[in-house]
Amino acid sequence: MKSLHVDDSPRRYRLAWGLLLLLLFVVVFGHHLMPYGIDKADKIPYLQLLDPVTGHKKPVAPPFAPSWQHWLGTDHRGFDLLSLLLNGAKYTLGFAFFATVLRFLLALPFGLYSGATGRGRSVIAFFNVVVSAVPPLVFIFPTLFGMYAFLSPDQTGVLLFAMIVVIGVPQISNQFAERSAFYAGRLYIEAARTMGASTPRIIGRHILPHMRSELLFAFLSDFAGVLFLIGQLSILSIFLGGGESFLVDDGPPAVLVYLSLNGEWGSLIAYGAKYIRSYWWIVAGSGAFFAGAVLILQFFSHELQRYLGSTAARHQAKPLRQNRALQATIGGVVAVCLATVFLLPNHAPNQKKPQETSASKGSAIPALSTSAASLPSEDDILRMNYQTAAMNFMEALQTKWDTAVLEMPEAPYNPTRKYVAPKEPIAPFDQWMQALKSRKLTYSNIGKISDGPTITLGWGGEFRTKQVEVYLHDADSGKEEVWYLYLDNNTRNYRGLVVGGKPLTE
């Protein structure tokens, strides 16, 4: 069993290095690996999906679930989530790294000096007890909540960053004060003092060299801790990533959310957590990236500690200049990274995506070309949505009311509002169905779109409508006549747009 343990340890150590290099590669080159751009021209406004009930294609607005075109799905704006996460890696991990560096720069001088001299130990210990007794969220969240009304968004971000840094200083100071005190009691330190060495020289020449591995392990552990804290704060909608306001109207009431412009992981978690029941993939992707980064850092720290603590590893260790195997490994990793960056299409921000390929055109969920020249206008999208809704409704109305009613909005879940979709045709659609069957009219096209009346449905939902001219072809006379449908003015309401119609007698 012992031999198995010895053989397995180097493999895990190499695996830890490989995962860490992969994480570093994503941070540095993530914006080159994006499968889609994240500029305004790269949004996907809608997709044409096949309705299994009516058998017709229907425009569906984002967010879209994971598919072959979008492995992690999209957000409400139509941005590819994998692209956002790859681009945001450098912001989230870079912020956590910078915050950890500042923690150590502030904590180490106090801790090392206090341990070497014995001064200020009680003060450091007191603050360590205070911050250790209560989770950091209890300090940060109430403070930000109380100051939110008095600070601008930029000032709030600065305050949050400062609190994340300061909250970790007492623990690091106390940890290294104890280690410094341990080494300060050694005989060679006493000898250095006897010979007139100053406290800074004792710390720099005799204490720090013995603590290099401890510093590395503590830094990695605190780095992972800062990332974990950022994730916790994100659940409470506290994040540093800049964003844009966006009105998400998936049904009453509409909600104003802030979405990340650069893909910062914390802001994506804060946004995705609000819709975990409806659009699980939004928070699942960002959560997986967060958890992966934390686990890689912890795994690397653990395996590095095991390796450096191994007697066999210390005897086999070679300087980098003499370690040909390590040089070849590093060179190979660098070569693969550079080849990946240069060979893959560049989708850095503000760059356009390539045009749609023939392979994507034949897929079940087509990847739309979203270059500036090919993007449909808002009027085109509006007309296409209304045309599809009118076509589906009118064709279903010719056969069965149960199918046609699917094109009407559903009542949101609310115990006080009990609305059941009518099993029998409601006015004026009962009149429409009779006319369609008796006169053998068929749907032809839609015409002019204008502002319609405001309509209130049975469950209390109020809709501002568009009046849409619906052309129907009379096979006997060869002529067309115009009927008027009232469709929901909010074209993102893909649960159903038809909210009413004008009686044929008017």
Image: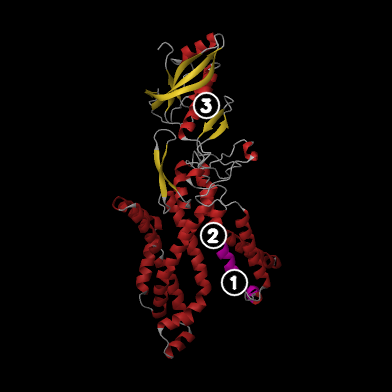
For the magenta stretch, what is the residue range?
297-314
Does 311 lie within the magenta span? yes
Q: Which residue position is annotated with label 1? A: 308
Q: Secondary structure at mark 2?
A: helix
How many labels were placed on the picture?
3
Q: Would you say residue 173 is visible in this rendering?
A: no
What crowding class fits label 1: few (fewer than 14 Cα within 10 Å), some (14-19), or many (20 or more)? few
For the C terminus, give its image quadrant: top left
Q: Residues within 10 Å of mark 2 (few under 14, many from 20)?
A: some
Which residue is label 2 attached to? 28
> Of the residues shown, which amino acid type is indicated by label 2?
Val
Which residue is depicted at the point 50% across and 47% down?
A: 38
Which of these two is toward me, 403 or 209? 403
106 shown above or below 291: below
* Main SS, magenta residues: helix
Between 139 and 99, the one nearer to me in the picture: 99
Say which residue label 3 marks: 388
| Residues at circles 3 and 1 in contact by the CB criterion of under 8 Å | no
| Residue at the farthest bottom position | 195
Q: Nearer the viewer, residue 101 or 195?
A: 101
Using the rendered view, name the quadrant where residue 19 is placed: bottom right
